[in-house]
């Protein structure tokens, strides 16, 4: 039986893979983790926003997706080839029902492919009319994580542990899914915690600004940057 080469497998997944519901800041976390893997001496690394659109929506890119790859539940259909791989490292970033209300608002505004997206579309996604759609993605994430856990190393991580609390033990455990318990760059871990908490605080403000009665003015400004 011919086994796929490392190069073939690696073209489909990263060294570390993050499964997360849209709006849960998985791309920011992936950027921090990827930098921690590729340069464990850069103790004050902070991702930068590419332009004003990304700044105002507090969104970031992950330039090292091959190291820490990001996945939304919708990216992995039931027949996706990644589900047949084995011995791959996955982080399942979980959210509570209350956090889902928070991340759904962020998802409505953090879609950076705004071509053709209208203010009405964004307002619709902010409304309760799309709650079931978002809950469906949340349920799908649970199913996919369960499937992946059969043949892979899947670590469940609470969104709040990383972003609200900046729990360094949890962040270290994420890195050690790759380093097998031997990651020792504590300054890097502390910085990841610091930057994730800071990012979360800005997202909280963004969330609150979008939901005030005149929050649609912020949407107008965001769309003007496209």
Image (cartoon, grey):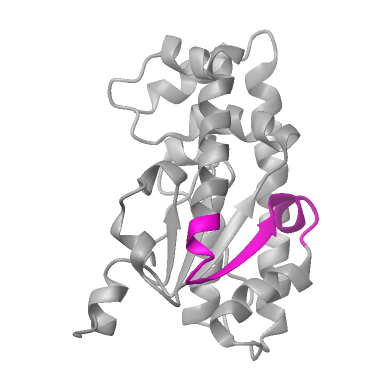
Q: Quadrant of residue 118?
A: top left
- Please say whether residue 149 is one of the residues in the magenta stretch: yes
Confirm whether residue 137 shows in the render.
Answer: yes
Note whether residue 22 is visible.
no
Q: Quadrant of the N terminus?
A: bottom left
Note whether 137 is above or below 120 in the view shown. Answer: below
Range of magenta residues: 146-166
Q: Quadrant of residue 70?
A: bottom left
**Between 135 and 30, the one nearer to me in the picture:** 135
The spot of residue 37 in percent (x, y) is: 51, 79
User: Is 63 on the left-hand or right-hand side of 144?
Assistant: left
Instruction: Give the residue displayed 31% in from the left and 50% down from the top.
Output: 79
Judge whether 51 appears above or below 14 on screen.
Answer: above
Q: Residue at x 50, y 44 (%)?
A: 59
Whether residue 3 sits left or right of residue 122 in the image: it is left
Residue ranking furthest to the left? 2
Counting from the top left corner in percent of width and height, residue 42 is at 57, 79
Q: Position of residue 151 (x, y in %)?
A: 47, 71
User: Residue, x 51% and y 36% (percent of image)?
Assistant: 137
- Tell me the quadrant of the picture where the C terminus can be found: top left
Q: Position of residue 111 (x, y in %)?
A: 43, 34
Is residue 112 one of those drawn in magenta?
A: no
Q: Nearer the viewer, residue 181 or 76?
A: 76
* Left or right: 53 in relation to 183: left
Which residue is pictured at 50% across the width and 25% down the height?
Answer: 133
Q: Nearer the viewer, residue 226 or 163?
A: 163
């Amino acid at each position: 039986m011919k086994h796929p080469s490392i190069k073939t497998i690696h073209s489909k997944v990263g060294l570390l893979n993050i499964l997360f519901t849209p709006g849960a800041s998985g791309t920011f976390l992936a950027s921090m983790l990827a930098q921690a893997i590729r340069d464990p001496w850069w103790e004050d690394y902070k991702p930068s926003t590419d332009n004003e659109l990304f700044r105002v929506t507090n969104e970031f890119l992950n330039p090292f997706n091959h190291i820490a790859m990001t996945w939304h539940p919708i990216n992995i259909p039931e027949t996706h080839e990644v589900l047949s791989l084995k011995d791959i490292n996955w982080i399942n970033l979980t959210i509570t029902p209350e956090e889902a209300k928070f991340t759904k608002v962020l998802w409505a505004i953090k879609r950076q492919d705004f071509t053709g997206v209208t203010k009405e579309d964004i307002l619709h996604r902010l409304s309760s009319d799309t709650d079931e759609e978002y809950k469906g993605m949340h349920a799908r994430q649970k199913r996919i994580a369960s499937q992946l856990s059969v043949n892979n190393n899947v670590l469940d991580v609470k969104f709040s542990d990383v972003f609200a609390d900046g729990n360094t033990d949890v962040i270290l455990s994420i890195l050690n899914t790759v380093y097998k318990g031997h990651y020792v760059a504590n300054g890097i871990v502390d910085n990841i915690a610091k930057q994730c908490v800071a990012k979360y605080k800005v997202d909280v403000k963004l969330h609150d600004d979008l939901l005030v009665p005149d929050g649609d003015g912020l949407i107008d400004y965001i769309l003007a940057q496209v």
